[in-house]
Image: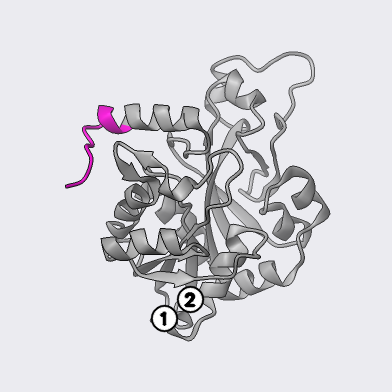
């Protein structure tokens, strides 16, 4: 399996902003079903599996034919859950692991591919991606994670605050449509060694402060590459997001599955 990619979709029920999030209905079907069907169709992944601590989520996934791995309920982050699964004997032959968020029903395969390629090229321990932030409302919204990156593509910092901060005035609309104003997309790819290195560290001070798991490897000195990609639909985190996503799915012609 040398060079093959294992996709893992972490899914937990303990969301504070949207209770039982993986099971929350979108157009009559649970969120995890929309995500899984998207992920299962991705050719960039050689195999994919759902990682969950919930038997309810596992039952829904099994009914879809999705491989499921039960995990500890005590993980501090999605990456810790991913690492538990990736280290099981059945998956140890995969050299690259992709953490595919369980709350993005319109996840773009091209964005997943760009993230994986950052790690394949060997310059980075971890790959992720970002897109222009586009609006001042998003720039100011703490639920929208921002990333600042160096000219090389290396991640400098992730924050819920509006970074980079333009000191004398707000950035105007056309500035928000390009770097350096970027919204982080929560897809990660890791080498197996990098994944082990990440979870070997306890949650860091900045990670706990901002509630952003990607600050842990950054504080530990790991190299995170950030690919800038095209427009990306935000995931589902709140009831308002559910309404927006249902409208978007309907706009694209999506209907409840038979």
How many other residues sit within 10 Å of disc 2, few (<14), some (14-19) or many (≥20)?
some
Upstream in sequence: badge 2 or badge 1: 1
- Of helix, strand and loop, which one carries label 2? loop
| Position of residue 75 measured from the top left corner of the image (x, y, whole percent) | 64, 64
Please name the residue shown 45% across and 72% down the image: 69
| Residue 179 inside the magenta-drawn segment | no
Q: How many marks?
A: 2
- Residue 202 position, x and y percent, is 77, 65
Q: Residue 256 lies in magenta, yes or no?
A: yes
Specify start and end residues of the magenta stretch as a single range: 249-258
Q: Which mark is residue 95?
A: 2
Q: Residue at x 37, y 41 (%)?
A: 25
Horizontal arrangement in the rendering, residue 71 relative to residue 206 (left or right): left
- Residue 243 visible somewhere in the drawing: yes
Residue beneath the point at 27% across and 66% down: 65
Q: Quadrant of the N terminus?
A: bottom left
Q: Residue at point 48% right, 55% down?
A: 115
**Residue under numbered circle 1:** 2
Q: Please, is residue 159 above or below residue 41 in the view?
A: above
Q: Are dots 2 and 1 in contact, CB under 8 Å?
A: yes
Q: Is residue 139 left or right of residue 47?
A: right
């Amino acid at each position: 399996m040398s060079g093959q990619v294992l996709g893992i979709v972490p899914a937990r029920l303990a969301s504070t902003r949207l209770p039982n999030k993986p099971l929350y209905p979108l157009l009559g079907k649970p969120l995890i079903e929309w995500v899984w069907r998207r992920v299962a169709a991705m050719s960039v992944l050689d195999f994919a599996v759902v990682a969950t601590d919930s038997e309810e989520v596992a039952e829904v996934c099994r009914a879809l034919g999705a491989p499921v791995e039960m995990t500890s309920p005590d993980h501090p982050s999605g990456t810790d859950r991913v690492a538990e699964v990736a280290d099981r004997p059945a998956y140890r032959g995969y050299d690259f692991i992709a953490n595919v968020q369980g709350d993005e029903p319109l996840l773009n395969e091209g964005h997943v591919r760009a993230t994986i390629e950052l790690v394949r090229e060997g310059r980075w321990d971890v790959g992720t991606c970002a897109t222009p932030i586009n609006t001042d409302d998003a720039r100011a919204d703490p639920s929208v994670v921002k990333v600042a990156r160096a000219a090389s593509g290396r991640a400098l910092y992730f924050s819920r605050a509006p970074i980079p901060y333009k000191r004398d005035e707000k950035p105007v609309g056309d500035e928000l449509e390009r770097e350096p104003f970027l919204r982080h997309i929560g897809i990660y790819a890791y080498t197996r060694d990098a994944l082990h290195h990440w979870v070997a560290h306890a949650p860091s001070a900045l990670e706990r402060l901002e509630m952003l798991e990607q600050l842990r490897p950054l504080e530990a000195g790991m190299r995170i590459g950030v690919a800038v990609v095209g427009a990306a639909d935000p995931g589902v985190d709140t009831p308002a997001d559910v309404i927006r996503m249902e409208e978007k799915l309907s706009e694209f012609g999506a209907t409840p599955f038979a």
